[in-house]
Amino acid sequence: MYRKFINARSPMRLFEKGLHGGLGVGNLGACVAAHGVGKTSFLVGVAIDELLRGGTVLHVAMNQTVSHVRDYYDTVYLALAASTHMDNPTEIHAEIDDHRRIRAYRGDGFSASKLSDSLKVEAEAGVRPTLIVIDGLEGSQVTRDDLAGVRSLVADLAAEVWFTLDAESEGDPLAALSGCEDLINVIVTLEAKGDEITLRAIKDHENEDLQDLHVGLDPRTLLLVRS
C-alpha cells in the first residue's frame, strides 16, 4: 500500500476526529495510564504517524537509552509495514529515521529548561520539530512552571507536544497531574479490558461533549488500531 493511503487510513484520523480535530499546534496533550498498559506504544504510534506525514519528531525519553528507544520505533514500524503491505518500506524507514531525533534524559529528571536546551541544539543543526513526545515522566517531575515553560516553547515553535505519565490512582488518572490539568489541552487514558486496550478521552480542549475515540492498542503488535 502506498504511504499516503496508509496515512489517510490510519487510526490516528479517527483519533483526531474524536478530539474535534486533534491536539493542534502549540498545545499539550497527556496520556495518563497505569504502568505497563501501553503509553510508550501510544507515543511511538503518534510519532510514526507524524513522520509518515512528512513531519519532524523530537522524542525525549526519561531513564531510557537512545538505542532502546530506536529499537522500539523499529519494532512498531516493521509491524506497521507488514500489516499494511507498505510499498518501499526500507526507503521509507530510512527517510523517517532522518526526521526523528532522540534525546535521553537520565538521573536528575525533566525540566522546561532542559527541553529548551535540546531544541536549541536541534535548531543549530537546522532541525525544527513539528511534534515533541516526552516519555516516562513521573508525577513528582511535573510542575506548573515546567508545563507553562513547555507551552511557551511549543507556541513559539508551532509544534504539538504529547507526554506520558503514570497514573497514581486507577480510578482517577487526573490525580497524577497535581492540579495542572488546566495547562493541558487534551488528556487521554489507556484502559485494559481483557485482551483489549482502548483509548478514552478525559479532556478535549474546552469541549464538554467527550466522544468515543474508537481507537485502541493491539498489545501483540503495539500498533494503534481501530476499536
Image (cartoon, rainbow, N blue to C red):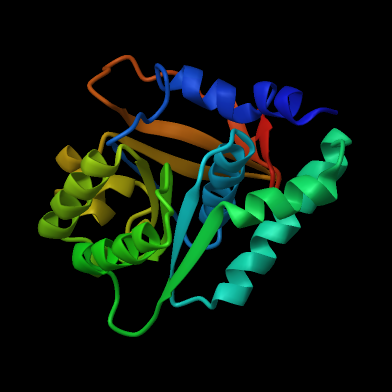
Q: Looking at the image, can residue 42 be seen?
A: yes
131 to 16, vertically: above or below: below
Which quadrant would residue 146 be assigned to in this image?
bottom left
**Residue 125 percent across, percent down from the top left:** 42, 62
Task: Please report the residue visible at 29 percent of the width from the left and 76 percent of the height from the top.
Answer: 109
Task: Please report the residue visible at 51 percent of the width from the left and 53 percent of the height from the top.
Answer: 39
140 to 39, vertically: above or below: below
**Image position of 35 (left or right of 114):** right
Image quarter where the C terminus lies is top right
103 to 224, vertically: above or below: below
**Residue 222 percent across, percent down from the top left:** 69, 50
**Residue 4 percent across, percent down from the top left:** 71, 25
Q: Looking at the image, can residue 219 be seen?
A: no
**Residue 144 percent across, percent down from the top left:** 12, 55
126 to 192, vertically: above or below: below
Image quarter where the N terminus lies is top right
Task: From the viewer's side, name the closer residue of 109 and 195.
Answer: 109
Task: Please report the residue visible at 48 percent of the width from the left and 62 percent of the height from the top.
Answer: 35
Task: Please report the residue visible at 67 percent of the width from the left and 28 percent of the height from the top.
Answer: 7
Residue sitting at the far bottom: 107
Q: How many marks?
A: 0
**Image position of 115 (left or right of 34):** left
